[in-house]
Amino acid sequence: MLLYLLYPIVRFTLWVFFRRLEVRGRDQVPRGRPLVLVANHPNVMLDVLLLAAFAPGSFPRFLGKTTLFKNAFYTFCLRQLGGIPVARSQDAGNQVGRNQDMLREACQTLRKGGALALFPEGLSRAGMQLRPFKPGAARIALRAEDEAGGQAGICLIPVGLTYTDPSLFRSEVVVQFGAPLPVSDFLEAYRANHGDGAQQLTSLLYQRLLPLILHLENPDLEGAIRDLVAVYREEILPQFPESAELHRQLLAGQELIRAAQYFARTSPDMVQVLTTGLRHHLDQLRRLDLAPNALSPGASPPTLWHFLLTLLLSPLALYGFLNNALPYFVPRLWARAYADEPEMAATVKLAVGMVTFPVYYALRMGVAFWIWGWTPALEYGLTLPLSGLFALYFKEHLLERWPLWEKWMAPRQRRRLLQDLAAERTQLIGDLDQLKTRYLTLPPEETP
C-alpha cells in the first residue's frame, strides 16, 4: 500500500529535482515476465528512485545493507517499500545464514513474477567508469530460473543512468533501458558449473551496459573529458539529429570519449597542451560566472522582449525566492560536508530537502493561521510551493541569460576580457575541428 502512495510523490520529487529527465527504451522491456534490472550506480539514492519511478511493470524490489534494517521504524518502511536486507563482509553476525535468507526471498520474488533492481558494481561511485560487476545479480537470476525448471522466463535488463552532474540539484539525467537478456539461454552452462555460468552472464551483462552510459577506460582522462564535453559537445550534436536532446548529448559524449582516448594513446603531448588550454578557458569563464557555451556564436542574446518580461515577472519570482530561500539553501549547506563524495551530495540534498520544505511550509502556515485564520493560511500555504517552482523557472529560463548583457553593459575592462575569451574559444574550436577531421578520416582498423 505504501508503495502506491509514494509512487506519485517520488515521480513529482524527481520532476522537481531534475531540470530535464529522459527515459528511453522502455518499449523493449518485456511485460508480464519476472525482471532483474541491472544498473550502474553513480548516485546513492537517486539511482534507486529513478528505477522505482520508471521501471515498466511491477515495482522492483531492492537489496539494502543489513545496517539499514537495525532500526524498527526503518525496517518497517524499507520492508513496505520492498527492501531485502543483504549482509556484507564487513557486517557482524552470521553472514552465510543471512544471505541465504536474502537469496531465498529474492528468488521467490522472481518466481512469483516480480522484479528486482540491483547494482552489481557494489558501491555507489560517481565518475565516467563502469567498475567490474560482482556476479550476485546473475546468480540470483540463474538460481531462480533453475528452481523454476527453466520455465520462469526471467530476463535481465541493463539500465544506464547518465547524469550531467550526479551531485547537482537541477541537473539532467538519461535513464536508458537496454535489450533484455533471457536467463534461460545461460541455464545449461549454469547447471554444468554454477560459477562459470554466472560469470558468463555477468560478463555479457557488463558489455551490454557499456553502450548505455559514458565509460572511460582510463579514469585519469576524466577531467579532460569533462572539459572537452563542456566546450565542444554542442559542435557535434548535429551529427545525431534523430535522437531526443539528452540522448544526443550522451551519444556526443561517447564519441568524444572514443576520440580522446585514441589521441591520448597516439599524441599524448598534443592532448596535454589542448587539455591545459581548455582548463584555462573554463576557469576564466567560471570566474566571470559564465556558462561554458555562453560565448558561443550560436548563443542568442536577450531581446527587448526578454528584458521587459524579466522586469514584469521579477516581483513574483522575488516572492517565491524569499518564501523558499531558507529550505532551499539548508540542503545545499548540509551537502557541503560531502563535497568530496559527489555520489552522496545529491542524495543528502534530496533527503534534507524532503524534510526542510514540508516542515518550513507547515511553520509558515501555522504562523499565518495564528494571525489570519484557516482560509488565508491555506491560501498562503498554496502559494509557497507554486511560487518556489516559478522562481526556479525564472532563474533557469530568464536570469541565466543575463551574463550575456555584460558584453555591452559591463565595464570596459570586463568587456575586453569577454572579447579575448571569445577569441580564445574560436581558436580552441578551430583546433578541435582539425582533430575531428583527422579522427573521422582514420582507416577503419585504427578507429577505436
Image (cartoon, helix red, strand yellow):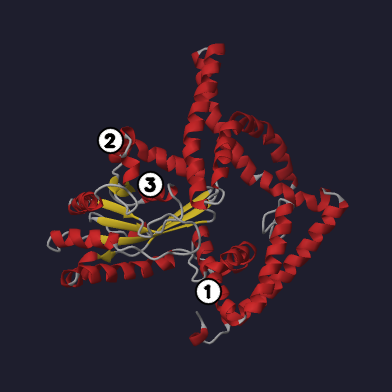
In this view, the residue in front, 186 or 24, is: 186
Amino acid type, label 2 = Met
Residue that carries the numbered disc 3 in the rendered image: 53
The reply to whether discs 2 and 1 touch (Cβ–Cβ < 8 Å) is no
Q: Position of residue 408 (x, y in %)?
A: 82, 51
- Nearer the observer, disc 3 or disc 1? 1
Task: In the rendered structure, find residue 258 and report the number of the disc placed on it.
Answer: 1
Picture layout, residue 85 above or below residue 164:
above
Residue at mark 2 to residue at mark 1: CA–CA distance: 47 Å
Q: Position of residue 275 (x, y in %)?
A: 66, 69
Amino acid type, label 3 = Ala
Q: Position of residue 437 (x, y in %)?
A: 62, 80
Amino acid type, label 1 = Arg
- Label 1 packing within 10 angstroms: few (<14), some (14-19), many (20+): some
Residue that carries the numbered disc 2 in the rendered image: 1
Going from the N terminus, do you reach mark 2 or mark 1 first? 2
Can residue 394 be seen in this snapshot? yes
- Label 3 packing within 10 angstroms: few (<14), some (14-19), many (20+): some
Q: Residue at x 42, y 67 (%)?
A: 210
Residue at mark 2 to residue at mark 3: CA–CA distance: 15 Å
The reply to whether discs 2 and 3 touch (Cβ–Cβ < 8 Å) is no
Q: Position of residue 48 (x, y in %)?
A: 39, 49
In this view, the residue in front, 375 or 216, is: 216
